[in-house]
Amino acid sequence: MLLPEATVAQRVSRAKATVRAAGARFTVPAGAELLGRLDIVHQVLYLMFTEGWTAGAGPDLMRPALTAEAMRLARSLHRKLPSSSETAGLLALMLLQDSRRAARTDPDGELVVLEEQDRSRWDRAAIAEGTVLVTTALRSGPLGPYQVQAAIAAVHAEAPTAAATDWAQIVALYDVLVRLTPGPVVSLNRAVAVGMVGGPAAGLDELQALQDGPLAGHHRVAAVRAHLLARSGDGSAAAHWYREAARRAGNVREQRHLAGRAAELERRAAERDDAAR
């Protein structure tokens, strides 16, 4: 939620106090009232999923029980509201992301980034189900952000290799997503895609707008900067930002992965210096 934990805890406490003071009773709403609450339900389910996908802190990269529960609830919601295209989009997004789970870590539990994953280990049944869901949802509209995110995930899932990824299509989908739900996380992800299409300098230009916003100081901004700098050939600067990203990250596995990237770049630089001498 890009907020300090203490801030969210205070909001929850105030909400509980309001509920108690109002004497509210929790009942399932109907009709327009039900549909009006769907956006918040979608957001909570996806927050559950993303925390399970990459734990905010702790020794493990993922919390599979949490992602499984988010998917179970999303599937239940979809069964109850089959005409909701955004509910279908959310479930599709979860399925398409989770299809990569087996390839996302090595035997020691360390992070394997998307471009280095063994795609033969991806769950093709989950990809097929997610692709059908998002394709149907996009045709039945109205268009929503979860459908677009699922479409982006489907482009990744359908690419036989990392090099074959249709990054131009991904940038176009992010352009749609920016119009639907502008925000710093969307802009950060779009910067990665722009860097793949227009070159690392173009991606770094996109990052400039995020320096003073809600993501300022976030480890993912530093990690993306490091990634783009490495692609540009500036290994020294990339190593610095990987170190910075590792320092800011809360998850131990992410910390190790980012520090490992920095160490690898520094090792290569030392080897080049030795060869030059």
Image (cartoon, grey):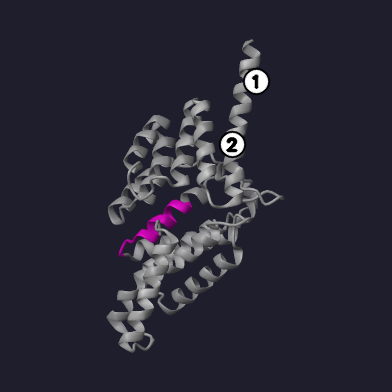
Name the one closer to the observer, 146 or 222.
Answer: 222
Per the image, label 2 sits on a secondary structure element best described as helix
Give me the C-alpha separation between circle 2 and circle 1.
16 Å
- The answer to whether any part of residue 194 appears in the image is yes
Marks counted in the figure total 2
Q: Where is the N terminus found, in terms of image quarters? A: bottom left
Residue at 58 percent across and 34 percent down: it is: 262
Is residue 87 visible in the rendered image? The answer is: no
Q: What residue type is labelled 2?
A: Arg
Secondary structure of the residue carrying tag 1 is helix
Taking the magenta stretch, the answer to whether it contains residue 146 is yes
Task: Check the image and report above or below for 89 versus 120.
Answer: below
At x 39%, y 86%, the residue is 26
Occupied quadrant, residue 45:
bottom left
- Asked if the residue under mark 1 is in contact with the one under mark 2, i.e. CB atoms within 8 Å, the reply is no
Image quarter where the C terminus lies is top right
Indicate whether 167 appears above or below 178: above
Magenta stretch holds residue 252: no
Q: In this view, does 218 lie to the left or right of 102?
A: left
The residue beneath circle 1 is 271
Q: Which amino acid does label 1 sit on?
A: Glu
Q: Which mark is residue 171?
A: none
Question: Where residue 229 appears, x then y in whole percent?
Answer: 47, 31
The residue drawn where x is 54% and y is 43% is: 246
Q: In this view, does 25 lie above or below 43?
A: below
Task: State the mark number for residue 261.
Answer: 2
Mark nearer the N terminus (2 vs 1)? 2
Residue for point 52% across, 63% down:
129
Residues shaded magenta: 142-154
| Position of residue 112 measured from the top left corner of the image (x, y, whole percent) | 61, 46
Image-quadrant location for residue 2: bottom left
Left or right: where 105 falls relative to 164: right
